Every structure is written in structure tokens, then in C-alpha cells.
Amino acid sequence: MKFQLWPVVCAFAFMFMLGAPPAMAADNDKVAAELKAIIDSGEPAIGNEDNDERVIEVYVFYAADRDYKPIWVRDTGPKSKAREALAVFKAANEMGLNPANYRVAEIEKRMGATSPRELAELELLLSRAFIDFGRDINRGRVVPKTASAENAIMAKELGPLTLIDGAEVTDSISEYVATLEPQTREYYRLKLALAEYREIEKKGGWPTVPKGPALKPDMTDKRVPIIRERLRVSGDYPRDAKGDGDFYGADLVAAVKRFQERHGLTDDGIIADNTLEAMNVPIADRIRQMELNLERRRWMDDDLGGYYIFVNVADQELKVVRNEKTIHTARLVVGKPYSRTPVFSEKMKYIVINPYWNVPSSIANNEYLPKLKKDPGYLQRQNIRIFSGAGDNAAEVNPYNVNWSSMNRMPYSLRQDSGPKNALGRVKFMFPNRFNVYLHDTPQKSLFEKDLRVFSHGCMRVQDPLDLAALLLADQGWDRSRIDVAVAGGKQRVINLDKPIPVHVTYLTAWVNKDGSVNFRRDVYNRDRQLAAALAGSLPTDERDGTAESASLGE
């Protein structure tokens, strides 16, 4: 099948007539002539019908204004730049990518080309591969929403002509490639950790710890030497420490606590099911986790702002960052697996003290209507009022005057007034978004003590929210005492932020802290698996297109 290149080529031919292009260099005129012949013929000398767009992009580059001058080869053979590009492609696994995606075997096989036709085909193959590689390391291999419709972020990417122009003018392909990667410390640290874990894998990884009863400090267990070696391999236990046989002593307890902290577990030093399960995750799985999170880092902008809120849903944590320093952290409760908190960025514009809670229709129908059928007074005890109509025409409804058993859908609107039972607590932080999720207080404080905090309908419940409000409003004359007075007043109050604050809601299951500690979290929403499938091109349609129930829930 021939490509429809004639309109493009003819247009460029007209441009050349208006202004004659520079003469072909003497050392590449034969290859240039072959490039022109390939492009004029419209035959797919590289690629196939599944990636016609990329092939056309390459062809347009050569036909546009360079008189088919090659970048990677000359008439006598491949340039050193071609060999450097091949070396960079081969090292793609250092960035969590697969070298095979850049056709390294075919390029390497063609590096011995001598005829103008063979060299022209190698030239096109290298350019096509470099465009793919440059795009992948710059903004990721897949569009975020391809992995999940809940990824409501758009990764910006460099155009093919920009990428290939940069490759031509650079004196060092490897140095140019380094500028295309994310320019953040977080990405760089994870990339280094990936290399370290690959070295551990080459040496055999870590041993599997046998199952058994919970192991507490000062107990004796035959598994202790295996645990000690497991943690020595991962760097949690000092390599020069000798240990004490089967005794679970203080030095190993400290190592277990470090391990638990890195994996988001309660750092109590008790080796029970969750800790044992985390220890026995194969190193190959941890390496894959790092690769997936390097992809997520490529989706993100390098500059998140000078002052912003960073939420990691997988970690169920929030941090406030100013001038690259974390100035506040808080635990979160996030969406249940069936009402998942999405990934997006928006700007916080206002804070509401003593908010009402307008109950979303999904909760009213799925949760409250069945309870009203059994007990008409249920909502009254929750301080939730029932209204018919809207706005000025809204009228409160007496629940005991309604025949709830005859209803399949809730015909009324529900509103929970401010107070100690309000589902949103005493404050909510609003950054308007299409999912209608936000940060807010909660009366269920005990949930923050749990390791796994996935209990909401999609919103993010934040620990110590009044402290967060005081921090965010400090520049507007609001300290904690003033906020407490407003809360005690009981009336709803909206406070607009003088300067909107970016809020970045992410999902990261692997990262490296500034101290070098490598952190992993459970994939509570199966998004690692979905991303891996998307990268492999095999994500089922129902998973790719299924939006979370979190949309428009608001709690």
C-alpha cells in the first residue's frame, strides 16, 4: 500500500521553486538521492501500515527544506552519531523502557550498510526510532488516559521536527537525550534506584521468608537468619552486622521498622502477614513497579509551581511544598476501590468553614433510600434534611409523610447541615474539577490510624484539616485561633484565596526520598496492572474506558 504523500511532496516542490535549496553536500549526495527516490515513490521503506503517521513525519522532515540531506549517515557509511544513537537506544532499560521498541536489532544489523540504498534505509530507520525514543523519554510511551480514564492529565510532548532537529545540531546524542528526560530530582533518584535494583537482581535478588506466626521483638524463630539476610540485601540491615542467631533482637527490629516505613506499613517491628507479604514481593516485581512509575513521572510537568499541594493517592498522603521544601504533611483517606480517587491537577480557589453537604444523587439512591425504607427517621438522626424543589422554591419534606417503600429513585435533594456529624467535617478545600472531588475534614478520625485508608466515595479526607487551613490562609490574616472562632460560630463561611494554589493529585507506587530510601506502596486501585497492560498494548476496553464512581460524588 502506498502512502498519500504526493500532496505533501508537491507542496514542498513548489516551495523549492520559490527559493532554491542549498546544494547537496559532496559526501552524501548519493544517499540523499536515494532518500528522495524513496520518499517520491511513497513506498514504506520503514514502518508499516500501523504507524503510517510516524513514517510520514520522517518523510516530511527530509522533503521539507533540507534537500534530503541525511543526519546519521554519509555515502561512505554510518556516522559516529548513528553509533551513539544506537548505544543510547540499547541503554533504554536504564530509563525503564524496552530497547526492542526502538528496533535496535534491525538498526545494529544495518550498521554495516555500504550501498546508497541501504544507507538511506538506515537513515530513515534511525530517524524514526529517534522520534519514538525522544517522545517516550520526554512525555511517556502512552497517553495517560489510555491506561485509565481516571488519569485526567495531558502530557505535553515535543514535536517530531523539534526532536530530530535537536539530534542533528547536537555534538553529543547522549547529552541531548539527557535534556529530553524529566529534569526533576524525583525522576533522577528513581532512575538511579532502578539501576541499583537491577544489580541486586543480577546477584540473585533476596531470599523468600517462610510463612509462620507473627514474630515480635525478643522472640526466637528459625526464620530470623533468613529475615536478616532479606533485609541486608535491600539495605535495611547493615551488611557488617553479625546478628544473633535465631533471636529477634533490637538491631533487626530497627531494620524491620525501616522496611515497614518504606512500604507504608505500621512501623511496630512486628512481622505479621502484611510485612511478610511485602518482604516476599519478588525483586522483578519491584523493578517493574519502578519502571511504571518512571512512566508516570514523565507524564508530569517538571515545574509544579513554587507553592503547591502534592497528593499521592497510592500513599494516602498529602504534602504542602514551598520553594522545593515540604512545609506540611498529612495523612489522607481516599476513595474505595470502587469509587477511586482520580488523577488530575487543578487550583484551589477557596476554603469553606462549617460546610453543608449536598448529598450526591448516587449516595442518596444507593445508600440512603434503602435505609429510609426501613427507618424514615434515619436521616434526621444524621442531621440530614430533605427538600423538594430547588432554590427559593425549595420546601423541606417531613420524612414520615413519604411512602418510601414505593420509590425506586430518590425524588428529593438531601442536605446535611453544618455540625459535628457532617460528613465533610468542619472545613473543605475547593479546587473545582470535573470529578467533583476535593479535600475535607471528617468526623471519622480513627481511620487515619490505619495503614490502608481507602474508605471514601472519591474525595480526600485530610488529617488535622484546621492546621492545613491555618497554613494556607496565613498570608490572609487567618491564624489557627481565628479559624477556631469561625468554626465555633457554626455558620458556613466561604474564604476565597487571594492566590489560587495548584493541587496535584497523583498515583505513585514507587519513589525515592531525599535520604535515598526507596519507597513502595500497594497498588490499591490496580493501576499498575492497567498501565502495564496499556504499555503492552493489551488493556481490555472495559478497564481502559471505565471511569471511577468517584465522578460527581463529592465525599
Image (cartoon, helix red, strand yellow):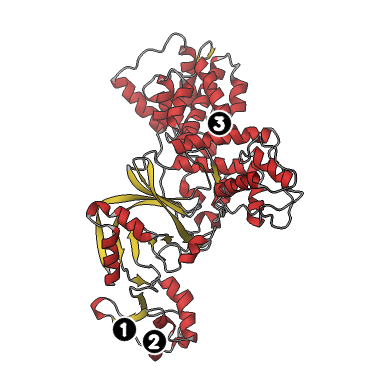
Q: Which residue is mark 1?
A: 396
What is the secondary structure assignment of the residue under circle 3? helix
Residue at the image position 58 percent from the left and 24 percent from the top:
107
Q: Pinpoint residue 487: horizontal percent, then vertical percent.
A: 30, 68
Q: Which residue is mark 3?
A: 92
Q: Quadrant of the C terminus?
A: bottom left
- How many numbered callouts? 3
Query: In the figure, is residue 62 to the left or right of 201?
Result: left
Instruction: Name the amino acid type tagged 1.
Output: Glu
Answer with the quarter of the image where residue 292 lies: top right
Q: Pinpoint residue 185: horizontal percent, then vertical percent.
A: 44, 35
Residue occupying the far right of the picture: 222
Residue at the image position 69 percent from the left and 45 percent from the top:
227
For marks 1 and 3 on the same chain, the one whose residue lies earlier in the sequence: 3
Which label was assigned to residue 399? 2
- The Cα–Cα distance between marks 1 and 2, rounded to whole angstroms, is 9 Å
Dot 3 surroundings within 10 Å: few (below 14), some, or many (20 or more)? some
In this rendering, the label closer to the viewer, 2 or 3: 2
Dot 2 surroundings within 10 Å: few (below 14), some, or many (20 or more)? some
- The Cα–Cα distance between marks 2 and 3, rounded to whole angstroms, is 64 Å
Which label was assigned to residue 456? none
In this rendering, the label closer to the viewer, 1 or 3: 1
Q: Is residue 97 visible?
A: no
